[in-house]
Amino acid sequence: MTALILALVAGAVVGLALGGLGGGGGVLAVPALTYLIGLPPADAITASLIIVTLTSITALTGHARDGNVVWRTGLLFAAAGVVPAMLAGAATGHLPRLGLTVAFAVVAGLAALRMLRPSPAPSPAAGEARPARAGAVGAGLGAVTGLLGVGGGFLAVPALARVLNLPMRRAIGTSLLVITVNSIAALGARAGTGVHLDWAVIAPFTAAAILGARDGKRHAQRLSGNTLQRLFAYALLAVAALMLADAFV
């Protein structure tokens, strides 16, 4: 019963992050499944990918109905990152866990600080006419996310908003497309690896996350793009601080 309650609460928080901020699901889900529910790390990562994939698809449909998904840019962004993510993921096993944790925290912190800087005004066609730039940024993001073992939404949103100049709401919606593609690719790579899936945890966690994503999207609609950007940045700073504390304390 305790595991069920924890799964429901953690799932709701993950869903709020994905639906409202367009990222942060994997960053939150893996620690929750590992530290709160007690799954082994390998099982937690695979379970997180399932949860994040299904929740992102649900949240993506809502943002797409509102016209907040830039499909061409999102697909270029995601496709460019698939191979680098797989190559970087293969290298992860040869790196120390402490180094990966610190790298994860540093990247999250830098992304947050970049988002807290004043944003340039986006052009009406921002993100639509930059296939080369979208591909280059997507490849870099894929390498980072493959190396650090996360879906990438917490990095995709600032990249889409700051580098490709998308308005914040469209960056959030498009990020969900990137997360969905990356997570499906990662799940495919992990198929047949013999990881145990605890569906008694995954099912309620996913259900709560899907409901939470709907609430997150509704709350996000009441906030301005700048407010959403600041909230996302502060969330990233908190994640970075917690990971550094976990690494060195």
Image (tube, rainbow, N blue to C red):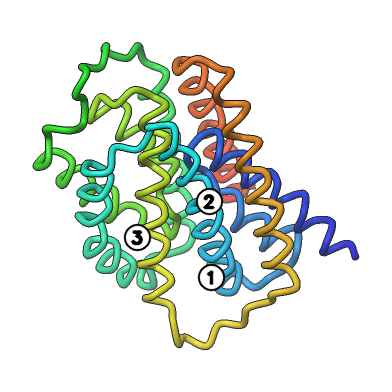
Q: Which residue is mark 2?
A: 58
Q: Label 2 sits on what residue type?
A: Thr
Look at the image and tell me whether residue 99 can be seen. no
Mark 1 → mark 3, Cα distance in angstroms: 14 Å
Q: Label 3 sits on what residue type?
A: Gly
Q: Which residue is mark 3?
A: 146
- Residue 125 in percent (x, y) is at 19, 24
Q: What crowding class fits label 1: few (fewer than 14 Cα within 10 Å), some (14-19), or many (20 or more)?
A: many
Give the structural element (helix, strand or loop) at label 1. helix
Give the structural element (helix, strand or loop) at label 2. helix
Residue under the image location 50 percent in, 40 percent down: 62
In this view, which residue lies farthest toward the left? 132
Query: In what quadrant of the picture does the N terminus appear?
Result: bottom right
Along the line of sight, which residue is nearer the eye, 104 or 47? Answer: 47
Residue under the image location 25 percent in, 50 percent down: 75
Residue under the image location 55 percent in, 48 percent down: 25
Look at the image and tell me whether residue 30 can be seen. yes
